[in-house]
Amino acid sequence: MPQLSDRVNQISESQTIAMARKSRELKAQGVDIISLSLGEPDFPTPQIIKDTAKQAIDENYSYYTHVSGYLELRQAVCEKFKRDNNISHTPDEIVVSTGAKQSIANLVLCLINEGDEVIIPSPYWVSYVELLKLAGGVPVIIETQIESDFKMSPKELEAAITPKTKMIMMSTPCNPTGSVYSKEELKALAEVVIQHNELYILSDEIYEHINFAGGHESFAQFDFIKDRVITINGVSKGFAMTGWRGGIMAAPKWIAEACDKMQGQFTSATSSITQKAIHKAMTLDYETYIKPMRDAFLQRRDLVLKLMKDIPGLKTNVPQGAFYVYPEISSYFGKKYDKYTINSGTDLSMFLLDVAHVALVPGAAFGSDKYIRFSYATSEDNLKEALRRMKEALAKLQ
Ligand code: PMP
Ligand code: GLU
């Protein structure tokens, strides 16, 4: 009997991608699904980036590049980090990949040994734990609460560190909670980390540009911790380029070199055309190209929070970034309608998919199944209709 490897058998399918697949299948069958499952901007990629890529194709920029990305691109990435985040890097500390997801996978495979512990504040992004499992790492989860805006405190971090802790993995702005750590909060966490040798921070900043709190803050801006920080970013969210597959990592040189070696065996590099597109994105005027998208997201967030207030039993924080709302839904537990009984976020998501034809992602994917994640990266009309349907369906649960 053919057998798959234990490695693949121990990981789960990405729940965000699974939910998106399910809603695509239902749509293909003619069901009128509103999909609020996958986190991806609904805006077109800026025309100027598309034109740059077309030109690269026409000019035959068609060949293998340096594994970590061509030199001028990595120089432009360094300029971006200096200009936007006050972090100084050299091109040999930059690895451009096929998406932030690959950057995270590269890093985990290069840094984590069997049995190493990695601290992950929960709620966390769906792929962290699964990628860690592939490397044999042990996730150590710190549960955070709505009341503290889902932020991990320095005390909680300190209490979770053991001699086996190798890394902390977190995102700010956070997927799925939208929480944004302030400069002071990051500094206080960094002050804990620096007390421990061989402890690293994976700082996932992919939502840098979707921040309503006024200004993104990076861990690596503090010189005293910079050698322990791996900053991960990309073009998927801020530039509406999810399908282009462009990720960026800035790290101490020895880590960047290891990731270059790893990536050289896996993908050789991301697409040469994508690299040209990323390069363009690094030099764009954000006020012109990014602010309109961010303003639209903010308007949608406010709309969603307002409409959610009208639906009993959805308890939320006020997300300061990214494009998700993450309501706590445990007041529906024990309630029933027809063949449905709700005992988890998974039950509620299935109920809403079947009865309201609204696709969401259960909180189980992000560490706790008493939540559901709602992406508001879609039109205001879709959001209004989705919330109307949800309100109607949830009222049926008794
Ligand atoms: N980190 C977080 C927090 C995300 O939400 C995502 C989803 N796109 C990624 C990383 C991966 O992004 P990319 O498309 O660049 O692989
Ligand atoms: N990051 C997005 C999300 O959380 C896209 C899906 C994925 O990459 O898993 O929905």
Image: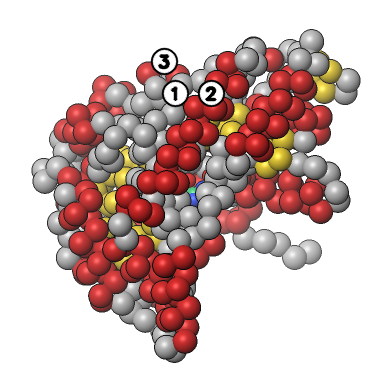
Q: Position of residue 338 (x, y in %)?
A: 88, 20
Q: Amino acid at mark 3?
A: Glu
Q: Is mark 2 within 8 Å of ligand 2?
A: no
Q: Is residue 7 left or right of residue 357?
A: left
Q: Is residue 264 above or below residue 315?
A: below
Residue lying furthest bottom in this view?
60
x%, y% of residue 120? Answer: 40, 36
Label 2 Cα neighbours within 10 Å, binned few <14 / some 14-19 / many ≥20: some
Q: In the image, what residue type sits under mark 1?
A: Val
Query: Measured from the top left, where is residue 329 in percent x and y?
Result: 62, 19
Name the residue carrying label 3: 147
Q: Quadrant of residue 46?
A: bottom left
Quarter of the image where the C terminus is located: top right
Q: Is residue 284 left or right of residue 187?
A: right
User: Looking at this rendering, what residue extends furthest in the left direction?
Assistant: 224
The CA distance from mark 3 to mark 1 is 11 Å
Q: Quick check: is the Cβ at mark 1 less than 8 Å away from ligand 1? A: no
- Mark toward the viewer: 2 or 1: 2
Q: On the picture, is 36 further left or further right than 318?
A: right
Q: Earlier in the sequence, mark 2 or mark 1?
A: 2
Q: How is the image coloured?
A: secondary structure
Tell me the quadrant of the picture where the N terminus can be found.
bottom right
Residue 305 numbered tag: 2
Figure check: 97 above or below 180: below
Q: Is disc 3 surrounded by few (<14), some (14 to 19) or many (20+) residues within 10 Å?
A: few
- Taking the spot 63% from the left edge, 34% from the top edge, the residue there is 383
Name the residue that disc number 1 marks: 318
Number of residue marks:
3
